Image (cartoon, grey):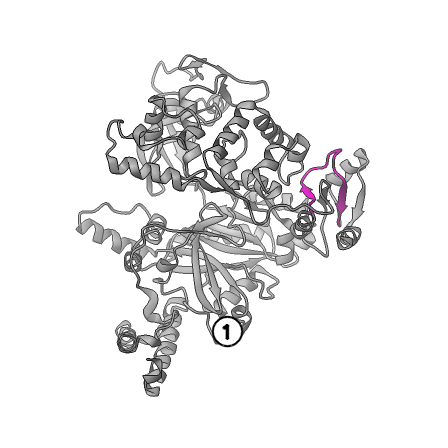
Amino acid sequence: MTSNIPQAVRERVEKLRVEINHHRYLYHVLDRPEISDAALDSLKHELQSLENQYPDLITADSPTQRVGGQPLSKFVKITHSKPMLSLVDVFSPDELSDWQQRIANIIPIRKIESDGYFAELKMDGLAINLHYKNGLLFSAATRGDGRIGEDVTNNIKTIEAIPLSLRRESKYYHQAMASDFEIRGEIFMTKKVFNALNRQLTTEGKTILANPRNAAAGSIRQLDPKITASRQLSFIAYEIITDLGQTTHEEEHAIAADLGFKIIEENKRCQSIAELVSFHRYWTEHRESLPYQIDGMVVVVNNEKVREMLGSVGKAPRGMIAYKFPAEQVTTVVEDIIVQVGRTGTLTPVAILKPISLAGSVVGRATLHNQDEIERKDIRIGDTVIIQKAGDVIPEVVSVVTGLRPAKTQPWQMPSEIDGEKVVRKAGEAAHKLVNTNLRSIKIRQLTHFVGKSGFDIDGLGPKIITKLYDEKLITNGVDIFRLNLDDILPLERFAEKSAKNIIAAIEAAKTIDLSRFVNALGIPMVGEETAYDLSTHFGNIDKLRQSSLEDYIAVYGIGERVAESIANYFSDENNQHLLDGLIKEGVVINNPERATKDGPLKGQIFVFTGSMQQLTRQEAEEEVRKLGGNASSSVSKNTNYVVAGEEPGSKYDKALRLSVPIISETDFIKLIKRH
């Protein structure tokens, strides 16, 4: 019982925790250890012994709780309070200057450079979001798709550089403890640890790891936290999500350090593009001196308010950019060029390469994009080519070493037909497509996408099984998948009763799905995960989405006319409507988003914002419109009800004048929403 614990023991345990956390902070955050590892281990052992003797003294943030618990069967999902966006990459000073010019077209350069830029060394690791409640680590999640990640809290607790509780000595402690504090950073493995791990794997006769980034990512995704603990991972913080009064990104790093997190001391505030280029050039030459790998630097508009006003485009924030180091390049031979058929019938030529190691992994293929790209670079089968990865998952062909070209090679041409189906290319489009989208290969790709992780996420239904089911005429569309039963699968070759039952159970479990993933699973041309999410939050439910008009789709923020036309065409197709009805009939339950646009006094009205807002950020203004049932669009059309003009409005203002769309000020807009 708690009451039977001697006071002296209580005091000793509390002092041990304070002392151990103090030395953990010195060692893993400040890199200034005061005592030996053996001495620190002795303190931990004493604490562990006392907690074993008096289990009621164990707390969630005790240093002894870093490794524990049973291995998980799988990771559960966590929805991020704020999306974890990706960054656009640039590779040259000119591209960096172009980025500055693009954002200067939105907000005056004097405001952007009021606090300069913050240059951060770009750690080559795994992004993670940490959530603290009442000052204690509550959860940790991977980036995932940017909106939903995997809960890896048990594994994160094994990393000594991540505090289980915020540093009480920090002047920000009480403010952070009073809120749901969130901070983001990078999990990484030092070069020293990576090399030692590979030596150990070699001794054990196991496959070595390709690079420290893959090693860190793989370690975090171990279901057993004890394996993660053995990998000696570390962590640096780079972004505070919670508002603690910070006005610059540079200040975020200082606050993070004060709260007990490790930051990169080499990061630097730069006033100009020239200073950023100089900083980049220095670390291009000196990066090998660092104990960890970096692949460039992140450039951030330092002023928090200005960066927020810049907003984002797609999955990338406008106010941040990744200025990468020059891409790694190697030469290899193009052994063949094949054509990949996409789920919408789009054809993509792919180079099959003589396998070669590039940027820490073995590369065997590279996308060639389209016929125009092949002709521009004059890529032929048999050519020796220069390829680069440049941070991309799929490498690209940079150029051909024409001096090594074999005799009698011929220019490559897109086939006029595939599997007996005609290949066409519409005027003004770069892509070749198949006219008949009912082709077997396309149907299989569509079905594979339908059950994939960004769709219904049905365990066990990979491309091979989907192909088997399709060829056996058991499935032709998504509805058929939910009609499958055990008797359909058992007779198929290589299916044991257990595996067949597992698939049926997975199909049943997948019947409940979020609206955004449901929309993405449909495979609407030009609609990916981001657009599916925007559609789901805008319309709120599938009935409203499927029954809307072209104008309604255009009114969705971030959706242009071509995408809107594709959505309208999809839902006007009778076969697609039957598919939707069939899925609902088979028991599919769609969870509507919590933040869906509601009915309200501004229902049906479309607002467009242009120029710099002073009292609200653009995102806040658009959210106010949606709360009242209206739509916030990124483009002006004759259907726009109001254009809200801030300081230094752009081309949207001019278009509103031409179309006689009412233009109101930010003050008038605030008065309008307050009336409702």
- Picture layout, residue 655 above or below residue 51: above
Left or right position of 81 against 222 = right
Q: Is residue 42 above or below residue 98?
A: below
Give how far across and how far down residue 170 sits, in percent: 50, 73
SS class of the residue under badge 1? loop
Instruction: Determine whether 278 is above or below 607 in the image.
Output: below
546 or 223: which is nearer to us? 546
The correct choice, above or below, for 211 with respect to 392 in the image is below
Query: Residue at 55% of width from left, 27% of height from top?
Result: 577
Asked whether 632 falls inside the magenta stretch, the response is yes
Q: Nearer the viewer, residue 543 or 217?
A: 543
Depth check: give the residue in front, 158 or 366.
158
Residue at the (27%, 76%) spot, across then down: 39
Can residue 115 be seen here? yes
Q: Tell me the magenta residue range.
A: 629-646
Q: How many marks?
A: 1
User: Residue 38 at what x, y percent from top left?
Assistant: 25, 73
What is the x, y in percent for residue 135?
48, 69
Q: On the rendered image, what quadrant is the N terminus found in?
A: bottom left
Residue highlighted by disc 1: 170
Verify whether residue 75 appears in magenta: no
Residue 603 lies in what quarter of the image?
top right
* Residue at position x 27%, y 37% in the image: 499
Depth check, front residue: 276 or 467 = 467
Question: Is residue 430 in sight in this rendering?
Answer: no
Horizontal side of 1 relative to 538 (left or right) equals left
